[in-house]
């Protein structure tokens, strides 16, 4: 059962929350980066989450028509086949989807899973993200209610981002300022609109100074202790301790202490994209520089097929990215926690 069933995905999240660890959620853009993520999880003996952003899905759809649904469905179907060879369990997830892309991405993908469930099958993806952080909170939560109801019917978990994450990812950008911190009132309004499980399970991407991309130390001020305030504020109002399953966005370059604090305060999923992109590309650049006259036909020569064969440098890229995924598992305490 390499791809989690709805029941197993819920078990994974429950185990993470109870054990105060989180699953790395690795963005992939190709069959090769998918294998790198699977390999990294397997070598860490950790279950995990593999996700596709709108930009990643467009890339996967091919540059001829750049169809996001085709790209994401194709890779998900591929994952259902190849993941069987890895002794771990993974969930498939779609990353940030803003309002203007819902009709071209998340809603059609939910429909795919609705059709599968109607046939007695499991959903294609195990969770989808609705990023309404650019909308007013009222509009954000109204759309969240609609999507959550559809997700529940398709046996899918919804992820919502209620307040902005700084920086830019796939065309969604926010300034780095004081708006990057979710308030208890924001969290209470979320609970009022989406419930606390009775309307369906959802993951909450709350903001505690998170920023996408890479920044030098001092440019980003993370306050992961804020998550405790959100849980306690909502928990006190509804009589439910630690009500939220939090997601850590914009975590590249975070300190070990910041990550540990986030885990202690309810984070069950942490996104990784920037760091794994670099890990994948770095050995490729090294190979090209070291074998310049082999990968190029310089001065009328014929080059060296063994050096420009994509398999040669592709294997290096996969190994490097897999090692970064394994490192992430250690940082998030998921190493050795796979479901037996």
Image: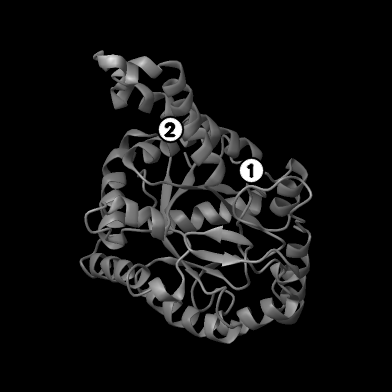
In this view, which residue lies farthest toward the front?
Answer: 299
Q: Residue 13 location, x and y as percent?
A: 54, 55
Q: Residue 215 location, x and y as percent?
A: 68, 48
Q: Secondary structure at mark 2?
A: helix
Q: Is residue 268 above or below residue 337?
A: below
Real-space Cα separation, disc 1 to disc 2, in angstroms? 17 Å
Residue 62 is marked as none
Residue at 39% x, 51% y is 4
Q: Residue 202 location, x and y as percent?
A: 52, 68
Residue nearest the observer in this picture, 97 or 196: 97
Tell me the quarter of the picture where residue 337 sits.
top right
Q: Quadrant of the N terminus?
A: top left
Tell me the quarter of the picture where residue 94 sits.
bottom left
Judging by the rendered image, the residue that carries numbered circle 1 is 332
- Asked if marks 1 and 2 touch (Cβ < 8 Å), the reply is no
Q: Is residue 275 above or below residue 182?
A: above
Mark 2 Cα within 10 Å, few/some/many (few <14, many 20+)?
many
Q: In the shown orientation, is residue 196 left or right of residue 72? A: right
Residue at 72% x, 45% y is 216
Residue nearest the observer in this picture, 286 or 161: 286
Q: In the shown orientation, is residue 108 left or right of residue 191? A: left
Say whether residue 322 is visible.
yes
Q: Residue 171 location, x and y as percent?
A: 48, 63
Image label count: 2
Residue at 30% x, 15% y is 299
Say whether residue 303 is visible.
no
Residue at 32% x, 70% y is 104
Q: Is residue 8 above or below residue 180?
A: above
Judging by the rendered image, the residue that carries numbered circle 2 is 39
């Amino acid at each position: 059962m390499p791809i989690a069933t709805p029941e197993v995905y819920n078990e994974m999240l429950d185990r993470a929350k109870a054990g105060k660890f989180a699953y790395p959620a690795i963005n992939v853009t190709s069959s090769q980066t998918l294998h790198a993520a699977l390999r990294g999880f397997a070598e860490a003996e950790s279950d995990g989450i593999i996700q596709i952003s709108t930009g990643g899905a467009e890339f996967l759809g091919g540059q001829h028509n750049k169809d996001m649904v085709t790209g994401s469905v194709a890779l998900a179907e591929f994952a259902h086949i190849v993941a069987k060879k890895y002794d771990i369990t993974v969930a498939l997830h779609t990353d940030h989807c803003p309002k203007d892309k819902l009709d071209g991405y998340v809603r059609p993908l939910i429909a795919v899973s609705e059709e599968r469930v109607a046939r007695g099958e499991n959903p294609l993806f195990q969770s989808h993200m609705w990023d309404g952080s650019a909308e007013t909170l009222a509009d954000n939560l109204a759309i969240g209610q609609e999507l959550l109801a559809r997700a529940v019917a398709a046996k899918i978990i919804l992820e919502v981002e209620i307040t902005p994450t700084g920086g830019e990812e796939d065309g969604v950008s926010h300034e780095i300022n004081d708006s990057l911190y979710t308030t208890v009132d924001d969290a209470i309004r979320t609970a009022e609109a989406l419930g606390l499980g009775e309307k369906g399970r959802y993951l909450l991407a709350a903001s505690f100074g998170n920023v996408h991309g890479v920044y030098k130390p001092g440019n980003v001020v993370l306050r992961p202790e804020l998550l405790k305030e959100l849980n306690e504020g909502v928990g006190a109002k509804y009589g439910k301790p630690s009500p939220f399953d939090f997601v850590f966005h914009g975590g590249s370059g975070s300190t070990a202490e910041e990550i540990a604090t986030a885990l202690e305060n309810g984070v069950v999923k942490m996104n990784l994209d920037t760091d794994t992109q670099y890990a994948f590309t770095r050995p490729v650049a090294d190979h090209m520089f070291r074998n310049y006259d082999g990968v190029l036909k310089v001065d009328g020569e014929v080059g060296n097929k063994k050096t420009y064969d994509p398999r040669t440098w592709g294997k290096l890229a996969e190994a490097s990215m897999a090692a970064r995924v394994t490192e992430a598992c250690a940082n998030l305490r998921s190493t050795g926690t796979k479901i037996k």
